[in-house]
Image: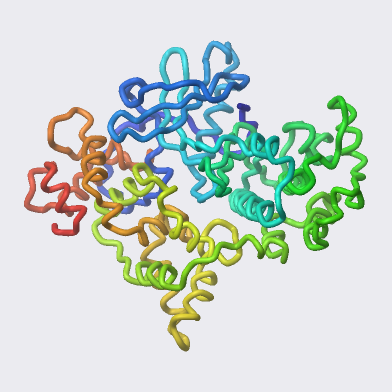
Amino acid sequence: MGCCGSSGPHKTIAASPLTTSPHKKTMKVSAGTFIKTQLSPFSEAYMLGNRIGLGGFGEVRRCTHRITGALRAVKIYSKELFGQNSTQQGKMIEEMEILRTLDHPNIIRVYDFFEDSKNYYLVMEYCEGGELFNKIEKMAKFSEDDAALIMRQLLSVVAFCHSLKIVHRDLKPENMMVEERNRKLNIKIADFGTACYLDLNNETTGVVGTTYYMAPEVFNGSYNEGCDVWSCGVIMYILLTGSPPFGGKTDDEIMAKVKEGVYTTESSAFRLISPEAIDLIKKLIAPLSERISASQSLSHPWLNRSRPKVERPVLEAVIKNLREFRSTLKLRDALLTFITSQLINHRELKDLRDAFVILDKDGDGKIGKEDLFEQLSGFIPGDGAYTHAEEILLNVDSNNDGFIEFTEYLRATIDKKILLSNANLLAAFAILDKNNTGKISVADFMNVLADREEYDLNLWTELVREANPDGKGFFDMEEFTKLLMDKI
């Protein structure tokens, strides 16, 4: 577990004070909206389980959400190990800030953040398959199909992060989690402790990373997002051959070979590896001036073998749901996004996730207008496809950034019987009703659903009144259910 070095924006995570601005009428909701410092103790929300990892500033343990019973992982940072180093604490908080902005099917999902006198607690998705590194140790090397599947997911994450000017800086198999225990290689990129924002010159500084995977320019202390692409190339090399391109008994030996940049694709290990795979490796592990970007790599023909196949009826149903989705009451929309991001087990949504990859034609982890147009052209004749693409984007893009992120997509396409199951309704109500009064007040809604910049009592009073004009300023379970079932 590392700490983030960043030249990007830095904010302290704390509940914002209430304001009463009468002019604030807009509200943006995303998966990151609900990730904030919880004022209650960690132990009130979670039961702590056994240790599953250990790092420089603490440990990772399993934990169980008391209300839902969901198994999650918690990264515990010991303040004692930080000592008086407030800079390191700030970097740790920056990791949290970066993770709040990342909504991608192959990035570890974050749920909660707690702080007490001894520790910080970052609660994340639990991946039962463990580290990809362990699978590499067991399997020695992967088939090209499996390696391509892993690399497409990895490069999609990297392209997504780079589009937000975020550089990971420590990509390696130890930071790539396997979602499930079975053979399916769904990957989640984790540990953004070394991630940072690029500065105004699109550069960053600091010799950061793990020697095997570091790009040569990193050792000079000034570089850009291309360092992640080099790391991807090294990972691909290891997946296909079982060995790193730059070996050595010490970090100094490895560093010298990385700086020299000479590696082989002519050994016996490459005898059965396709020319297309070798071509991509050479484009990734290349001098910075010749290295392709993550987004460019996603169009490489070798990665086409890894695209999922979705039955046409599934894709038709997804497109139908996207076309029919309409944003309605702001409070209802916020609640649906909350349930989608915080309560749904995404491992159960394989078909929807595969369809997302199909719709995301360029593979950058988000669906844009051109992505939609290309898919709709196969279902809608003439110029209607472009019009419908614009309408879908307008209705589904709840945070108004011009793209459909993964949680926005799921909210629009998921089966309502799954989304609004009795278990999810009860859990959502219990989480909102923190004081166990049997009623959800305006303040309850605001404290859970509001972004830090949306702590506006007048705004949330208006949203609750809009959702239930005949109510008394609060919702009981029956009214809450009616609201979400679209019966109010």
Does the image show residue 169?
A: no
Q: How is the image coloured?
A: rainbow
| Apparent side of residue 277 relative to residue 11 in the rendered image (left or right) | right
| Apparent side of residue 216 relative to residue 337 in the rendered image (left or right) | right
Q: Quadrant of the N terminus?
A: top right
The structure residue drawn at horizontal position 60% and vertical position 39%, both measured from the top left corner, is: 8
Residue 393, percent across and down?
A: 43, 67
Q: Quadrant of the C terminus?
A: bottom left
Residue 177, percent across and down?
A: 58, 39
Judge whether 266 appears above or below 70 on screen. Answer: below
In front: 393, or 243? 243
| Apparent side of residue 118 relative to residue 92 in the rendered image (left or right) | left
Residue 487, percent across and down?
A: 14, 59
Judge whether 435 appears above or below 307 on screen. Answer: above
The quadrant in which residue 121 appears is top left
- Toward the bottom, the furthest residue is 382
- In this figure, what is the number of numbered marks? 0
The structure residue drawn at horizontal position 65% and vertical position 38%, both measured from the top left corner, is: 135
The structure residue drawn at horizontal position 68% and vertical position 55%, both measured from the top left corner, is: 148
Does the image show residue 453?
A: yes
Residue 279, percent across and down?
A: 82, 60
The structure residue drawn at horizontal position 46% and vertical position 13%, both measured from the top left corner, is: 118
In front: 415, or 181? 181
The quadrant in which residue 20 appears is top left
| Apparent side of residue 360 relative to residue 246 in the rendered image (left or right) | left
In front: 43, or 460? 43
